[in-house]
Amino acid sequence: MAMGTLITAAVVLAGLNTLLLLPLVGVWVRNYNTFRTGLVGGLVLFAVAMLAENAMAIYFFFSMASFYSGDPGVQQVVLLLRGLQFVAIAALSYTTLR
């Protein structure tokens, strides 16, 4: 079964989230190795957890496409959540990498 437009957009956002998180992990790991503070360690754990969540989301979008494709309401909510996550990660990326 083919994925709908909303779910396809959600998959794209999950992929973009993953791409934005990769450099953040690198910066935060380097900073943790330098400063060894709990805050930076927490940022590393946050980024790794978000990477795992987005990777699993992409996997489930493709392996369970029929689950998401049945209800347009579910598709809208999934897309909204991915969009909010993208905005949050983009803001973290901007402030970290500038």
Image (spheres, rainbow, N blue to C red):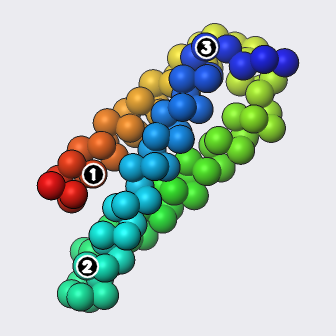
- Identify the element where label 2 is drawn: helix
Within 10 Å of disc 1 (Cα), the crowding (few <14, some 14-19, many 20+) is some
Is residue 77 found left or right of 5 in the rendered image? left
Within 10 Å of disc 3 (Cα), the crowding (few <14, some 14-19, many 20+) is few
- Identify the element where label 1 is drawn: helix
Nearest to N terminus: mark 2 or mark 1: 2
Q: Pinpoint residue 8: horizontal percent, then vertical percent.
A: 61, 23
Residue assigned mark 2 = 31
Inter-mark Cα distance, 2 to 1 = 15 Å
Is residue 98 found left or right of 22 in the rendered image? left
Discs 1, 3 touching: Cβ within 8 Å: no
Occupied quadrant, residue 41: bottom left
Name the residue: 15% across, 55% down.
98
Q: What residue type is labelled 1?
A: Ser
Residue assigned mark 3 = 5
Q: Can residue 38 be seen in this view?
A: no
Residue assigned mark 1 = 93
Q: Pinpoint residue 71: horizontal percent, then vertical percent.
A: 69, 13
What count of labels does the image hold?
3
Q: Is residue 23 above or below residue 44?
A: above
> Which label belongs to residue 8?
none
Q: In this view, does 87 lie above or below 96?
A: above
Q: Pinpoint residue 75: horizontal percent, then vertical percent.
A: 60, 19
